[in-house]
Amino acid sequence: MSQAEAISYGSVALKPSRFPGLALDVAEVHLWQAPLDGRPADIFESFLSADELARANRFHFIKDRTHFVVARGLVRNLLAAYLGINCSELRFSYGAKGKPFLLLDGQTQINFNLSHANGRAAFAFSRGRDLGVDLEYVKEDFDVELIANRFFSRAEVLALRTVPAELRKQAFFNCWTRKEAYIKARGEGLSMPLDQFDVSLRPGEPAALLNNYREERELTRWSMKSIPAPEGYVGALVVEGHDWQLKSFSLEKVNAPNPSANVTALACPQHNRLSLG
Ligand SMILES: CC(C)(COP(=O)(O)OP(=O)(O)OC[C@H]1O[C@@H](n2cnc3c(N)ncnc32)[C@H](O)[C@@H]1OP(=O)(O)O)[C@@H](O)C(=O)NCCC(=O)NCCS
C-alpha cells in the first residue's frame, strides 16, 4: 500500500507538506501522545526497517508486536515530518544500552525518545538536547512498599512513607516515571544504579532531580517535568538544559459517524484539530 493510500485509509502518514507548522524550534520540546490500538499494523509495518521488522517478529504476543510496530511507525512518521524527508530515508542507530538515535548529516539535529505503556505511547522531540520520556499505566494491585524498597533510593523510600496512604500510589508512579525518564535521557538504562540519585515524588510538588550522589553537576544539567497524561497513566520528561518550552500534541483516533471514515486527528494544545484522513 502506498503512503498516499495509507493517508486515505485514515492511518497516520504525516506528510510535511500537509503540516507546514510542524517545525521544531531549538527552544522547544515537542511531546506527542497516541493510542496504539485500533490502528492498522500492516500499514505501519511498511514504514519499518528490516531490523525493526525482525525485532517485531520476535515478540511472543501479537499485542506486544502491534504496539511496537505502531509506535515505531508513528515515531518514524513524526521524524520524517519534522525533517521533511520520507520515512525510508531515516536511519536509526543505537547507543551502548540500546537508546535509539537518528543518523543524520552533520547539519541537522533532532533528538527523540519514546515510551509505551498499556496501548499508549509518548514521543518526545528536541533539536540538539538529550532527552528521555517515560509513560506508565497505573497498576492497581501491587505492593508499593516492596517495589519501592527494591528500586528507589533510601531518601525516596523515606519520602514515600510520609505521603498519605490515599496518595501513595500516585507518589510511587511519580517517582518511577521520573527515575526512568532520567536514566533514559542519559541513555543508560538499568546499568545506572537507581539508588545513586533522588527525584521528587510528593503529589503537588514540582518534578525535580534532587540529588545525584555521584555527579553533582547533573542537577543543573537537566530539567524534569511531569507530562499531561489521561486518567490511569503517569508520565515524566527529562530534557537537557532549562531554556526550553514544552508543546504537547496528541494523535487520537476520532470516531466519525461512519466508521469506515474514521480518521486520525492531530490535536494541538489549543484544541485545533487537523484531520489526517
Ligand atoms: C529499556 C529501558 C530504557 C526502558 O524500558 P521500559 O520502561 O520497559 O520501556 P519504555 O516503553 O519506557 O521505553 C522503551 C523505549 O525506550 C527506548 N530505549 C531503549 N533503550 C533505551 C535506553 N538505554 N535509553 C533510552 N531509551 C531507550 C526505545 O525506543 C524503546 O522503545 P522500542 O520499543 O521502540 O524499542 C530501561 O530503562 C528498562 O529496562 N527499564 C525497566 C524498568 C525498571 O526497572 N525501571 C526502574 C525505574 S525506578
Image (cartoon, rainbow, N blue to C red):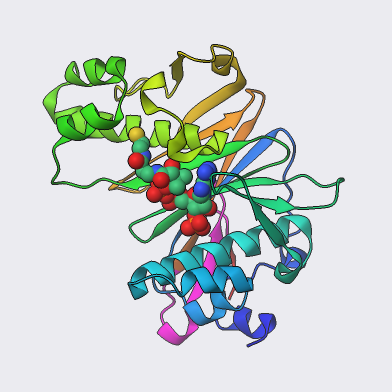
Number of on-image labels: 0
Q: Is residue 160 visible in this depiction of the protein?
A: yes
The residue located at (79%, 53%) in the rendering is: 104
Provide residue 234's location: percent of width, then percent of height.
35, 41
Measured along the vertical axis of the image, is residue 167 above or below residue 17? Answer: above
Q: Is residue 128 left or right of residue 238?
A: right
Measured along the vertical axis of the image, is residue 149 above or below residue 181?
above
In the rendered image, residue 252, in percent from the top left (x then y), is placed at 46, 62
Q: Nearer the viewer, residue 60 or 206?
A: 60
Of the 4 image quadrants, the one containing the C terminus is bottom right
Q: Nearer the viewer, residue 158 or 173?
A: 158
Magenta span contains residue 269? yes
Residue at 46%, 65% (x, y): give it.
68
Q: Position of residue 44 (x, y in %)?
A: 55, 74
Residue 213 figure quarter: top left
Residue 208 magenta: no
Please provide percent x and percent y for residue 117: 37, 54
Q: Which residue is pictured at 49% across the width and 41% down the height?
A: 133
Quadrant in which the N terminus is drawn: bottom right
Q: Residue at x 61, y 45 (%)?
A: 95
The front one of 186 and 33 is 186
Q: Is residue 199 visible?
A: no
Q: What residue span does the magenta drawing correspond to?
A: 254-273
